[in-house]
Amino acid sequence: MEMWLWASVGIMAVVIFLLLWKIHALQSAAKEIGSAFADRLATETNTLIDISSADPAMRRLADSINLQLRKLREERHRFEQGDRELKNAVTNISHDLRTPLTAICGYLDLLEAEKTTGKAEHYIRIIRNRAELLSQLTEELFRYSMILSSGGGGVRETVNVGGVLEESIASFYTALKERNIAPNIQMPEEKVLRTLDRSALARVFSNLLNNAMKYSDGDLDITLSKAGTIIFSNTASGLNEVQVGRLFDRFYTVETAGKSTGLGLSIARTLMEQMNGTISAEYKEGKLSIVIALPKE
């Protein structure tokens, strides 16, 4: 009797050991599949998931995931091809529109030089206004499509962020003065250096300054921190939280923005993402704040 008892205990121990080994093997296979799946999603590769486990269920799972990976890869390629074609089409269309728009503006110049009645002058001013707005939109659309097509391939160099910011503010001095905006600027004494595309960073600052002139009630605070955070803040009573939440949407404009194309902040966001930085907007107690977080060195 005692022998049978010990034999039963031994068999149970072997069964438990085999079950534990099976569970460990399945867990290892699951981890292997999970790691391989994450790697295939993150990298552009045609390599499928291959596991070391011989378990039929795990191999069927790997085959099923590989089937979905193939479909996902095909969908991604179709999307990328369509995206490239759309970008090229937008670039070509905006480029083609430049020539007739330039001709229209030229003929408007000639027409304005001719003697006309007061009513005709009024109509000419309306046409001029619409032509300039269309020209501005075409130019912004062309630049936006070029930025998207470039994929962030600008020249990276060590940039003194404060220096670029000062240059950008100086270039807007006259425009800001005309709107009675005297910016309050705060920067650290030591230089804030980052490896960035200098022209892209200057474009971001330019677009944010343009944005401030559209929505500011007369104030503008610009702060650069040692950590590389830049904040453009101004009172904007003409905005609300819903509008601020959509400021980075392409072609979204607010009525108070005047001749806005709705692309300035979209361009700024795209450029910041290409430089591995972030840009966001918040609205609190009537104050609009746009925050840039530069990538760390």
Image (cartoon, rainbow, N blue to C red):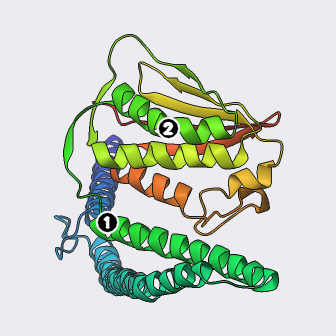
Q: Is residue 142 in view?
A: yes
- SS of the residue under disc 2: strand
**Type of the residue with mark 1:** Leu
Q: Position of residue 106 (x, y in %)?
A: 48, 81
Q: Nearer the viewer, residue 141 or 77?
A: 141
Give the residue at x 82% y 48%: 238
Point 38% across, 26% down: residue:
162
Pick the residue in front: 136 or 34: 136
Q: Can residue 1 be seen in this snapshot?
A: no
Classify 10 Å Cα crowding around label 2: few (below 14), some (14-19), many (20 and above). many
Decide if residue 142 is on the left or right side of residue 45.
right
Quadrant hosting residue 103 = bottom left
| Residue 292 at x, y percent in the picture | 49, 38
Look at mark 1 in the image and give the residue it sits on.
41
User: What residue is shown with label 2?
Assistant: 292
Disc 1 to disc 2, how far (Cα)?
29 Å
Number of labels in the image equals: 2
Nearest to the eye among marks 1 and 2: give it.
2
Q: Which residue is drawn at 61% across and 63% down?
A: 249
